[in-house]
Amino acid sequence: MAAYALTQAGANVVLIEAGPLWYATENSKMLMWPYQSPRRGASTKDHGFGEFDAAIGGFSIEGEPYTRAPGTRFDWFRSRMLGGRTNHWGRISLRFGPHDFRRKSLDGLGDDWPIRYEDVKPYYDKVDRLIGLFGSKENLPNEPDGLFQPPPRPRCYELVVKQAADKLNITCIPSRLSIITKPTNGRPACHYCGQCYRGCLTNSNFSSPSVLIKPALATGKLTILANAMAREVTVDAKGLATGVSYIDKATGEDRRIPARIVVVAASALESARLLLNSKSALFPNGLANSSGVLGKYITDTTGSDLAGFIPRLADGLPHNEDGVGGMHLYMPWWLDNKKLDFPRGYHIEVWGGRGVPSYGFGGGIQSYPGGGGYGKDLKALYRHTYGAMVGFSGRGEMIPNDDSYCEIDPDTVDRWGIPVLRFHWKWSEHEIKQVKHMQDTFEALILQMGGTLLWKKGAPENDYGIAPGGRIIHELGATRMGADPKKSVLNAHCQAWDVKNLFVADGGPFVSQADKNPTWTILALSLRTSEYIADQMKQGAL
Ligand SMILES: Cc1cc2nc3c(=O)[nH]c(=O)nc-3n(C[C@H](O)[C@H](O)[C@H](O)COP(=O)(O)OP(=O)(O)OC[C@H]3O[C@@H](n4cnc5c(N)ncnc54)[C@H](O)[C@@H]3O)c2cc1C
Ligand code: SF4
């Protein structure tokens, strides 16, 4: 987004990218049938979500380790491709609400942002118009409506979920995904092939290479240095950023690119690593770290799942249920915390249905009633149960805490000799209680649909099934913004307090997590920061 907005404003931009070039419109495997591969779509080392998935990267990358403090479980998903994780994300595109920017004022926990919803709203609107998303106007208190295109109709199993949610008084509305259902800015509408994770050949969903980078290249003002691993932001004697040193991965050579302004957007934690590694006589603790807050207060979304077998959906008539590559319905947070034993909330994502059969079967046929067997009986059971599984994923808000942070591991470097991150992580009681509530709600929904659980629900001995830190892949914080330079890395424009020509444009500036997926807010903030940079340059202040 920063490359797009800055080139539109007339700036010359060099984008340093650790991975190769990758464009969904050219490289997507959207039209591959599972039977065209002997693996039938099963995951590989580099494609953890399936072999056709548009991901290069994963929770572990050869030669690029990270470490964990003793007793810590934190898993870090990293992309190494142009556009990063926007190539294979779920495209759930939610705005943060007015309360999400001022939670400390409301419940005394965490911190307030130095900006309010009203500061970001114009940029959400611009992102909606530029990229496009579908959804429905609902006027819910902390779930702002966007400039939505019409949503697709619910599928059969989603209607069953909606019935159950209505009975239990759980708000259940059309999902909000950055997939266009009307032609938008030269891109055709989605044709409902259901394969968004593979990247879209027709450019009908959002991935940054096809939607933002290509128009940026068309200005003639963008140069991409691919397979270039940034090592350090360099500074001059006055403490201003002078450019970036990087490794040319093809040759292993160290190089440097000079720049008037440096925007760091390598994903929240990788950006913190880059700044922590940018040490100099002026900045002995890392660049922009006079507060000592760099790397601190990292968060991830809380997560837990549960699935059920729904007999009403068994022996379903075969029909095309593809739709968009993702859910058509979801449940935003619907309760009042005053009546609960935990702060903040979560939303519920819904999965199931009759998508293209591939490797694996709904968590394993053996977990279904009467599951297993051989030959004809087994095939009959597959047909009987196919499409009768419905699952729920809770995605909630973690409150930043002093025990969750990253730092440079003094003893470990990656294959280029760059020091790596070491993680410290702790869920607090708030998150564990929230996940217990998720599990109880999922069970109630499954029972209301007349179903049985496909696996045991979370219990105290496994912290109610809370996913390990990092596993929901919504890591945020580490370069937080704030109103006080002693307590934050960046000001309200995502500009480093200590280095006025250094900015951060990823999830690092976030002060709180919210119960929403973060990427729409990352895009809106990046656009806001980029417009600020352009404005300051025009005024001669930068
Ligand atoms: C399977 C999956 C599903 C998801 N679903 C959703 C969803 O539905 N909704 C939502 O809001 N979010 C979702 N997310 C999260 C979302 O993808 C991220 O929030 C978003 O991509 C973050 O953008 P980013 O630019 O900060 O980081 P990234 O997308 O990770 O991009 C970082 C870029 O920096 C490059 N890079 C890293 N280090 C260096 C270096 N040292 N030098 C040079 N380049 C470097 C990387 O190669 C990459 O191109 C999902 C993620 C995954 C993996
Ligand atoms: S479902 Fe729509 S947006 Fe997704 S890959 Fe298919 S055509 Fe593209």
Image (spheres, rainbow, N blue to C red):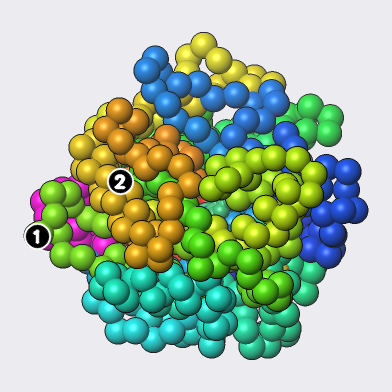
> From mark 2 to mark 1, how far is it between C-alphas?
17 Å
Residue 423 in the image: above or below residue 144: above
Looking at the image, residue 28 sits to the left or right of residue 5; the answer is right
Circle 2 SS class? helix
Task: Answer whether residue 108 is magenta in the image.
Answer: yes
Q: Which residue bears the numbered disc 1? A: 338
Q: How crowded is mark 1: few (under 14 residues within 10 Å), some or many (20 or more)?
A: few
Looking at the image, residue 386 sits to the left or right of residue 431; the answer is right
Q: Nearer the viewer, residue 531 or 86?
A: 86
Residue 266 in the image: above or below residue 76: below
- Residue 310 position in % (x across, y down): 49, 61
Question: What residue lies at 68% left-to-right and 68% top-to-bottom?
Answer: 194
* Picture quadrant of ligand 2: bottom right
Q: Which residue bears the numbered disc 2? A: 435
Q: Quadrant of residue 380?
A: bottom right
Q: Nearer the viewer, residue 476 or 364?
A: 364
Question: What residue lies at 70% left-to-right and 59% top-to-bottom?
Answer: 383
**The residue stretch that appears in magenta:** 100-114
Q: In which quarter of the image is residue 299?
A: top left
Amino acid type at image mark 1: Lys
